[in-house]
Image (cartoon, rainbow, N blue to C red):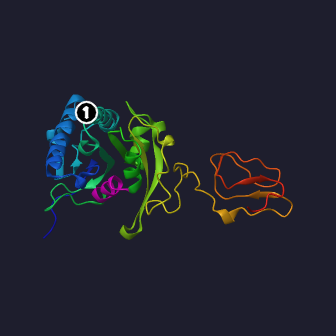
Amino acid sequence: MAMDHHPERRLLISVDMESYSRRGNILQYEAQQAFHELLHAAAGSVGLDRAAWSTQGAGDGELAILPRDVSESRVIGRFVPELNRRLRAYNSSRLPAARVRLRIAVHQGLVHLDGANGFPGNAVVFVSRLCDADPVRRALAAFPDAGVALVVSNDIYRDVVLEYPEEMRPDRFRQVRISKPDKGFDEFAWLCVVDEDLSTAPALTGDGPDDPEGGAGSPAAPSPGPVRPDSGRAHPAGGISVGDVRVHGQNAIGPGATAIGSIGRDAVLGRGGGDR
């Protein structure tokens, strides 16, 4: 059958709840109610009409295709921060298991609005991959009080976040590589946790399939683990014997060197230390 409807270029938003499947029936029901009410309230408070969004719902989130005339800067620079504030307020009086925390991905591209079973289009696949990426999950998990982890495509970051940030801070975004070899997906995107500083978080990339090579602009690698006893034998001219050393920051180990860090009970520093 011939296709008689052409795709349209639209702004796409994918939203997913953290830890939804770990909840019992009642908590899932309450989380869905809160999700629906908080999104509507946040959109309405910044002048966005959620009723005009084309949505494809799931129990733990939704895919939304926004109208042609929607203000992209209002969505990212005002709606997302407002939603974050409301989520934080909602969560402040709830136990961790009942809190609603969201991963949000924003992208733009061509999409068919008349699909027989959803919204066909590579842009839909792209924004869904961003929302489900491990770096985004880890970023949200690193800040227990946060409401929203936001990830945007390169185009959205360049054209909207940098040019029309509104309430967002472009300097709080970090570039991450999202790689899914089994899906043929390997892209860079920009990530932030709203009202948090990602530079204080553990590494978000480099330890999983999403970033096998530690993509450009990724946060610093985790602090090194303990050095094993056989990794620091004595130097013939005198040196260091290490049972257990964990070093943070600048360090130098060897004859006449100074190590900055914490030293376990088995370490012996000095000339002619030898193993003990």
- Horizontal and vertical percent for residue 176? 46, 52
Q: Nearer the viewer, residue 175 or 134?
A: 134
Left/right placement of residue 43 relative to residue 140 reads left
The percent position of residue 263, horizontal first and vertical second, equals: 66, 49
Horizontal and vertical percent position of residue 54: 17, 48
**Residue farthest to the right?**
237
**Horizontal arrangement in the rendering, residue 237 relative to residue 13 (left or right):** right
Q: Provide the secondary structure element on which disc 1 rests.
A: loop
* Total count of labels: 1
Position of the C terminus, as image quadrant, is bottom right
Picture quadrant of residue 234: bottom right
Residue in the image at 67% along x and 56% along y: 266
Identity of the residue drawn at 24% across and 54% down: 22
Residue 23, compared with residue 184, is above or below; it is: above
Q: Residues within 10 Å of mark 1 (few under 14, many from 20)?
A: few
Is 13 covered by the magenta stretch?
no
Residue corresponding to mark 1: 93
Q: Position of residue 59 (x, y in %)?
A: 17, 53
Q: Quadrant of residue 180?
A: bottom left
Main SS type for the magenta part? Answer: helix
In the rendered image, the quadrant that contains the N terminus is: bottom left
What's the residue at 14%, 52% (across, down)? Answer: 25
Which one is in front, 256 or 181?
A: 256
The amino acid pointed to by label 1 is Ser
Q: Is residue 160 above or below residue 187?
A: above
Q: Which residue is painted at 17% across and 47% down in the image?
A: 27
Query: What stretch of residues is rendered in magenta?
Result: 124-133
Residue placed most toward the observer, 135 or 174: 135
